[in-house]
Amino acid sequence: MITGKNYIGNSRSANGNTTYKTFNPKTNTENETVFTEATSEEIQEAVNLASEAFKTFSTISGAKKATFLNAIADEILELDDALIQTYVSESGLPEGRAKGERGRTIGQLRTFAKLIEEGSWVDARIDPAQPNREPNPRVDLRKMLVPIGPIVVFGASNFPLAFSTAGGDTASALASGCPVIVKSHPMHAGTGELVAGAIVKAAQKTGMPNGVFSNLNSSGIEVGQELVKHPNVKGVGFTGSIRGGRALLDLAAKRKEPIPVFAEMGSVNPVVLLPKALETKATTWAKTYASSITLGTGQFCTNPGLILGIKSEHLNTFIHTLAEEIVQIQPQCMLHPNIHSAYHKNKTQAQDQQNVKTVAAINTVVAENYATQAVASVDGKTFLENSTLHEEVFGPFSLIVKCENEAELEEILANLEGQLTGTVISEQNEVATHANIVKALSNRVGRIIFNGVPTGVEVVPAMLHGGPYPASTDSRFTAVGRDAIKRWVRPFSYQDWPNELLPDELKNENPLQILRLVNDEETKAAL
């Protein structure tokens, strides 16, 4: 049942006077539930509970935390159709997308459960004492990763489940041993409350400390700002706009004790079309990219918003086919009227720039909040000189840059801001003759794709979902995959500590049977 209240630890609370409702973009009407924004007192209580919970939760075994994460997954499944219908009513997305995203959320939780149950992720390293070493004895040193403290997670607008209340940030932070306070996204507060209830129920069933999780409602920026500035908050996870992520990063840096902000802030995901690939398969790739550009109404952070090629008749064929194909795809509903309005504004701004030509657009009347996809083109010189054209248009839009030659293409890639992904479309072995292009693209992205599309992010150990700024605030980390846990920990060393007082991960007998680096050799053996 959705109440519109906050979860302050295990208790519901609604002491504030600021209220709001979510919106159904398909029906263009407000949903019924009234949500109450968290007060400063409720924020303080949530952070205090999280700080107390951290003292216990940070010491709970990986096996017990894994039971907690698996219980969250089970409780989310128990929500069944109530969750799916709430998701649909708050996002305008279809049931199939809701069920797929629920499956991804469950998969992420179970992936982290498996990781921490096995335990080797803590990267335990042991260099035993050498008392007889000459000329100086060596002390006993043991190091592992430990959780940093309460984490604030901001729900994402475009993924009401997989990047929100129990999404990858929350799952990885809880797995690391950090309590989580979610700043629920106002566009899908009902979905968030249902999932928050599942997390709280799982916490109670598995004996987790009160305050290990809280969920706070907010229609504006004040709650988030107050959370980030709180001295007992030790890290932030964010998925959203460059403007929002940068504001949080600056706010965290101004604290007396600066804290890490791991923000994934979007991308235009450049796609490079090499000449021979266009010569042989221009039509095929154009059809493929018409689908990728419009997938999910273009509301993925990996949407291909920039396509680059060298001027030729084959590039013209690609553009012509893409234009024909993309207008045949049925327009789809966007997540919210505000997102639809921003898309229309940013698309129009790009199309109105000097020397930009619109090559495909739907001009017929569509339903309210439905996006009309478009493709535009521009010459390489103009693109280099106009930074406005480098900006992301969040929605089903892509800009094609027609470069004079390979040198101009390389220059454009080198001058792009950081991106989540880059793609190279190549004929067999063609890419080997364009090493400079590949190198320039690699320097600007977190993940490079060969003959594919950037849309679709697998939740696997080898995934890197991040990239040079502003794609993310720290390109050394990923927001997807099990390495996402490394954002919420720090290395910690023990020197000459009594064996019986060490964490199990570092004890001589290795009771957890994890893989450790001992005297520069990986082993599960006891000392």
Image: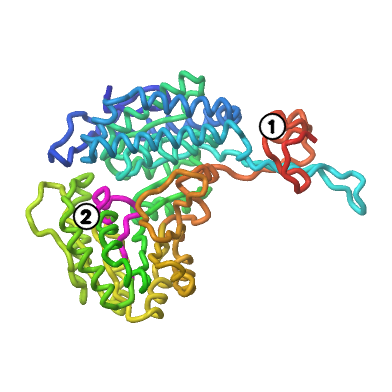
- The residue depicted at 16 percent of the width and 50 percent of the height is 330
Rendered location of residue 84, percent (x, y): 27, 31
- Evaluate whether residue 427 shows in this view: yes
Colouring convention used in this rendered image of the protein: rainbow
- Does residue 242 sit above or below 61 in this rendering? below
- The residue depicted at 43 percent of the width and 40 percent of the height is 168
Q: Is residue 288 left or right of residue 340?
A: right
Residue range highlighted in magenta = 293-308
Q: Is residue 420 left or right of residue 333?
A: right
Residue that numbered label 2 is attached to: 342
SS for callout 1: loop
Residue that numbered label 1 is attached to: 513
Q: Is residue 62 left or right of residue 343?
A: right
Most distant residue in the left direction:
365
- Does residue 152 sit above or below 359 in this rendering? above
Looking at the image, how many numbered discs can be counted on the residues? 2
Q: Is residue 283 left or right of residue 242?
A: left
Quarter assignment of residue 323: bottom left
- Does residue 344 sit above or below 197 in this rendering? below
SS for callout 2: helix
Q: Which quadrant, please, contains the C terminus?
A: top right
* 3D distance between C-alphas at marks 2 and 1: 53 Å
Quarter assignment of residue 381: bottom left
Q: Amino acid at mark 1?
A: Gln
- The residue depicted at 37 percent of the width and 32 percent of the height is 215
Q: Say the numbered circle drawn on residue 252.
A: none
Rendered location of residue 38, percent (x, y): 33, 33
Q: Amino acid at mark 2?
A: Ala
